Amino acid sequence: MTGTSNPAASLKVTTDAWEALFRAQVAVMRQITAMPEFGKLSMREYDVLFNLRTCPGGKSRLVDLNKQLLISQPSLSRMVTRLEDQGLVVREPDPNDHRAMQLSLTEKGRKLQQEIGREHVKHLHNLLGSALSEDEFHELRRLSTKLRDAVQ
Amino acid sequence: MTGTSNPAASLKVTTDAWEALFRAQVAVMRQITAMPEFGKLSMREYDVLFNLRTCPGGKSRLVDLNKQLLISQPSLSRMVTRLEDQGLVVREPDPNDHRAMQLSLTEKGRKLQQEIGREHVKHLHNLLGSALSEDEFHELRRLSTKLRDAVQ
DNA sequence: TGTTATTACATGCATACGCATATAAATTGG
DNA sequence: CCAATTTATATGCGTATGCATGTAATAACA
């Protein structure tokens, strides 16, 4: 009891859990980065296509997309330019807000996302499928989601 | 049952859990990156100092350190050069293997790591402490560690 | 409604990054 | 014990990144 807020968990338990989650993410991500489906497109670029496919209406403003990613807004802006040059994404002015740009996948972008995605989940399943039991995966998902919701 | 390996969990359960863990990591990392303790040193650079403090004997070869990180070996090599220039890290030839370099913290590096670390855990605790119960943090740690061990 | 502040996106610039490769030392195999 | 292979680190080079800032449009508010 120090007089600050009243968190449920001790400092050590909190930070140890975060440390473990972070290290697990690094370990898995190292394997993922080396997978063959990320030869054409980097993981970060794929993540943009993935987010555009799964966002409501298949359209997203640059700022909103940026909230899902770790890269800066200027970096995302330029990445979108590169994805546009490859014919995977289109920028359209937002009719409701003339400052904003609506991003969406082209048909080619959808195809590529689907193609990479199919390989990706297959390889992920090979890599992780037997690491935890089905119940443990459910619990990991629940806890991760709860953690995410708490910080946003 | 397809004839491939015999993973415990279904494809969807596995990938949904990974997706949730990854998104949680992104959300937390976005907050962390904005914290004031990472004004002098980037999160990636701090992670190098942190790893050098916690590794056995306080010394690590570049390749071994690299395994804990997401950046490439050449990037780490140059980052170490920059940290050396700042007087935070030293490179010493490994007496047992003349190809290798032993990395360790200088006194200044230790001090800075400690200083940033103290702020960092405090802010992390503020951010995450009330997100989960103590038991949930323990379980998140256990599952993350199990996942990590399975892929390494 | 006119002024100020805020928001969304783009661009200049310095730098960090990854890939391919070079160098040098250790290991392996005949 | 020598040649071929592998391992550890460093460097050249093109590119992606972040920070600071610019431009334009919306929002706030007096």
Image (cartoon, coloured by chain):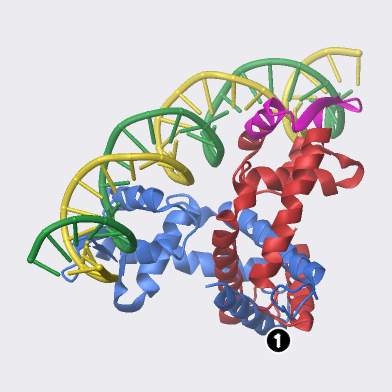
Chain colours: A blue, B red, C green, D yellow
Residue at position x 72%, y 79% in the image? A6
- A78 lies left or right of D1: left
Residue at position x 55%, y 55% in the image? B34
The residues colored magenta run: B78-104
Marks counted in the figure total 1
- B131 lies left or right of D19: right
Where is residue B72? Give x, y as percent. Answer: 62, 41
Up-down: is A92 above or below B89? below
Split into 4 quadrants, where in the image is the N terminus of chain B? bottom right
Where is residue B65? Give x, y as percent. Answer: 75, 43
Within-10-Å neighbours for mark 1: few <14, some 14–19, many 20+: few
Where is residue A32? Give x, y as percent. Answer: 59, 58
Residue at position x 47%, y 69% in the image? A118
Where is residue B124? Give x, y as percent. Answer: 68, 64
Q: Amino acid at mark 1?
A: Asp
Quadrant position of residue B28 = bottom right
Quadrant position of residue A50 = bottom left
Q: Chain of mark 1?
A: A
- A12 lies left or right of B126: right
Q: Secondary structure at mark 1?
A: helix
- B2 lies left or right of B152: left
Up-down: is B46 above or below C28? below
> Can residue B47 be seen by looking at this rendering?
yes
Q: Is residue B101 magenta?
A: yes
Q: Which residue is mark 1?
A: A135
Q: Nearer the viewer, residue C30 or A38?
A: A38
Q: Nearer the viewer, residue A95 or D7?
A: A95
Quadrant position of residue A16 = bottom right
Q: Is residue A140 magenta?
A: no
> Can residue B2 be seen by looking at this rendering?
no
Split into 4 quadrants, where in the image is the C terminus of chain B? bottom right
Up-down: is A101 above or below A142? above
